[in-house]
Image: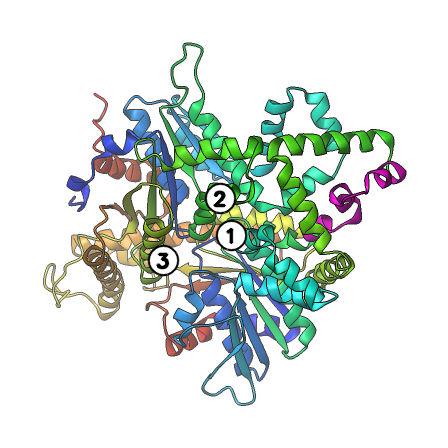
């Protein structure tokens, strides 16, 4: 299979970043990409943490898939848990925590109603995991894959340290925010990768996202993953669908045309993106039937392996 | 069936995870409402400007704009895009007791940072604008395209959170000179907890911040009642029988799980959920795919038919799971993938016909 973009992307250098933020338009496959990135890192011998932000639910397939990689751990973070964890760390007493925060409503209200704090807490958790050490003082996680919310919210989250520092001039929050900001903006340690699909609106949004990151944020921007690229490479390209295998009916010609125009439309979007952007891209082919289909895991995994250049186990 | 939803409701709230065509569905509902002779407004909170794109009418603003729908007769479709900052400002102006108070709040640095930068501002702004538009009573039906938040729950909870935020018991801790009242109105332990919490917050945020917050909040003096009332009204409005919550999704397991979780939240909160719209389903392209697979076809066509069959079977399972969940209490509408990119009005009208 010919997957364009591969020769240009060096995945080892991508995984040299400890924190990999994944975002993109809603519904393009951020979670799926996060999981495959984790797999690719684990196959390189890395200890990996996948960190899902504000997810309402999980697909049982994900656990089944990741269960085969003992080096991958997974957490679901939401602000309520982060808040509790952070406060416990600061207060060092469960009793005190429940005295203050469970019997008393004000801080909960602040937590809910001041969303800037919510987002900061999520980043704070990522920072905490990134600086964790093992008993032997080595890094607890070689890679942290952060499965972020979609475009608008992701920008808000990445922008939060800046805003917080505009508001808080002193105090622990300000000091810790500076540390978080330094981690995010360190081009050696953190990178943001985007995922999109080859459709007009999604590509448009991706271009806007990229220019926003370039103009307003200081985080390093990695490759763009174009997910669900319909390759249908076996559908003939010529104007006459009859040619390769004899005559086909009108119905089947229309059927084939549906897929052909989908494929050609996607190709057009990708070409246009390439013309207007210098970002490296990596295409991930569309696999029909997604996760309920038992053949799915095998099929997509094989394709992902081709993409990530992972040597097959003997 | 979607026409009936439009006929029988005053507010339709389109929710769902990202990338499923919420904005397009909202616009299509607006068009259909107009074609049914209603005066409809579509309220979108999408920062990606997709509604304007798909309507092909240039920029949308915080003020409603009339979209000409051919054949709508006396029906009208209006569209507007929420500008979070402007909405927040106008809510403050509406509610303040004097113009001077409004300007003080809007000029406050904390307000300026928070009112436009944090993600939740979209939720608060959306709720505020919904309330404004509703109380104007200028439209027969309001269609709300919820913010592209990972979980729409934030949006639904926004009025409650706002109410909590402005509840007297909380504000007391922050307003100057109120320490005594804490002790008067709450038990000793809680009061003690409150003071400790304040001390901790001071340590966390620096004492200037707490002073700023206190100042910020005291600026709102006299408006709390209005905010609380508005929050109550919005909560009642959302739970009203004349409101309809729809969940839009695509035919994928991940989206299905998220939608089912959302469904549970609606149920738990007693919100009037009316149906799932499964967008972007594979259209029925051939009659009997199994029969065709048995025929002797070129190899490429055979692969394509197999691919097609896998996909439609998979989508069928998703629909089945949704049906099991709702057990007849709401509708499920499958909408086939639209063959064209929807970014102008004629195509959008074509899409609405297919949807409704």
Q: How is the image coloured?
A: rainbow
Where residue A278 appears, x then y in whole percent? 21, 51
Residue beneath label 3, please? A205
Mark number displayed over residue B117: 1
- Furthest residue in direction bottom, as rendered: B73
Residue beneath label 2, please? A160
Magenta stretch contains residue B180:
yes
Please state which of the two labelled residues, at mark 2 or mark 3, is closer to the viewer. Answer: 2
Where residue B239 appears, x then y in whole percent? 71, 60
Q: Would you say A282 lies left or right of B164 here? A: left
Where residue A58 appears, x then y in whole percent? 50, 39
Q: Nearer the viewer, residue A106 or A63?
A: A106
Quadrant (top left/top right/bottom left/bottom right) for the N terminus of chain A: top left
Task: Judge if badges 2 and 1 mark residues of a common chain.
Answer: no
Q: Would you say B278 lies left or right of A244 here? A: right
Chain identity of mark 3: A
Where residue A161 appears, x then y in whole percent? 48, 41
Circle 3: element type: helix
Magenta stretch contains residue B41:
no
- What residue is drawn where x is 68% and y is 52%? B162
Circle 2: element type: helix
Q: Would you say B252 lies left or right of B257 here? A: left
The 10 Å Cα crowd at callout 2, few under 14, some 14 to 19, many 20 or more, is many
Q: CA distance from mark 2 to mark 3?
A: 21 Å
Q: Which residues are magenta?
A: B162-185
- What residue is drawn where x is 60% and y is 71%? B142
- What residue is drawn where x is 64% and y is 63%? B103
């Amino acid at each position: 299979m010919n997957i364009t973009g591969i020769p240009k992307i060096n995945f080892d250098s991508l995984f040299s970043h400890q924190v990999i933020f994944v975002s993109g338009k809603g519904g393009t496959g951020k979670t799926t990409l996060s999981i495959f990135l984790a797999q690719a890192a684990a196959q390189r011998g890395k200890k990996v943490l996948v960190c899902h932000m504000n997810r309402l639910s999980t697909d049982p397939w994900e656990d089944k898939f990741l269960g085969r990689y003992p080096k991958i751990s997974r957490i679901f973070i939401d602000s309520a848990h982060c808040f509790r964890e952070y406060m416990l760390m600061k207060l060092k007493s469960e009793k005190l925590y429940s005295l203050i925060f469970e019997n008393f409503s004000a801080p909960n209200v602040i937590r809910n109603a001041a969303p800037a704090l919510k987002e900061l807490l999520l980043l704070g958790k990522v920072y905490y995991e990134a600086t964790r050490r093992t008993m032997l003082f080595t890094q607890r996680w070689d890679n942290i894959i952060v499965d972020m919310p979609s475009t608008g919210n992701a920008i808000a989250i990445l922008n939060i340290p800046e805003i917080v520092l505009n508001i808080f001039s002193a105090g622990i929050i300000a000091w810790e925010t500076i540390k978080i900001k330094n981690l995010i903006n360190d081009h050696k340690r953190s990178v943001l990768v985007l995922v999109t699909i080859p459709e007009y609106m999604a590509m448009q949004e991706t271009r806007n996202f990229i220019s926003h990151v370039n103009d307003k944020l200081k985080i390093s921007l990695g490759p763009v993953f174009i997910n669900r690229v319909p390759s249908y490479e076996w559908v003939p390209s010529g104007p006459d669908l009859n040619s390769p295998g004899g005559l086909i009916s009108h119905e089947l010609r229309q059927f084939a045309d549906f897929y052909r125009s989908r494929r050609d439309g996607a190709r057009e979007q990708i070409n246009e993106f390439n013309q207007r952007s210098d970002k490296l891209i990596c295409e991930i082919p569309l696999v029909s039937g997604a996760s309920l289909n038992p053949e799915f895991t095998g099929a997509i995994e094989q394709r992902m392996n081709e993409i990530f250049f992972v040597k097959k186990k003997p | 069936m979607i026409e009936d939803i439009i006929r029988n409701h005053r507010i339709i709230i389109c929710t769902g995870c990202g990338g499923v065509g919420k904005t397009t569905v909202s616009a299509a509902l607006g068009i259909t409402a107009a074609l049914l002779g209603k005066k409809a407004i579509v309220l979108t909170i999408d920062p990606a400007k997709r509604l304007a794109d798909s309507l092909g009418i240039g920029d949308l603003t915080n003020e409603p704009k009339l979209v000409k729908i051919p054949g709508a007769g006396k029906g009208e479709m209006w569209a507007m895009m929420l500008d979070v900052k402007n909405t927040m400002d106008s809510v403050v102006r509406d509610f303040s007791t004097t113009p001077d108070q409004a300007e003080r709040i809007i000029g406050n640095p904390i307000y300026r940072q928070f009112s436009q930068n944090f993600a939740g501002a979209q939720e608060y702004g959306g709720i505020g604008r919904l309330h404004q538009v509703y109380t104007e009573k200028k439209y027969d039906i309001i269609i709300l395209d919820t913010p592209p938040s990972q979980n729409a729950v934030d949006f639904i909870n926004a009025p409650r959170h706002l109410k909590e935020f402005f509840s007297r018991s909380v504000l007391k801790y922050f307003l100057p000179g109120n320490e005594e009242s804490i002790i008067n109105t709450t038990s000793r332990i809680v009061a003690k907890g409150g003071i400790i919490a304040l001390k901790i917050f001071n340590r966390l945020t620096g004492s200037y911040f707490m002073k700023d917050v206190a100042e910020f909040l005291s600026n709102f003096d006299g408006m709390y009642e209005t905010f609380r009332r508005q929050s109550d009204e919005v909560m009642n409005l959302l739970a009203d029988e004349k409101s309809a919550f729809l969940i839009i999704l695509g035919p994928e397991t991940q989206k299905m799980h998220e939608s089912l979780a959302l469904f549970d939240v609606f149920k738990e909160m007693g919100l009037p959920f009316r149906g799932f719209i499964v967008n972007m389903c594979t259209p029925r392209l051939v009659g009997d795919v199994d029969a065709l697979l048995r025929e002797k076809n070129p190899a490429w066509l055979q692969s394509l038919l197999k691919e097609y069959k896998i996909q439609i079977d998979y989508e069928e399972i998703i629909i089945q799971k949704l049906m099991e969940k709702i057990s007849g209490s709401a509708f499920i509408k499958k909408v086939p993938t639209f063959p064209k990119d929807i970014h102008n009005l004629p195509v959008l009208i074509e899409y609405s016909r297919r949807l409704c």
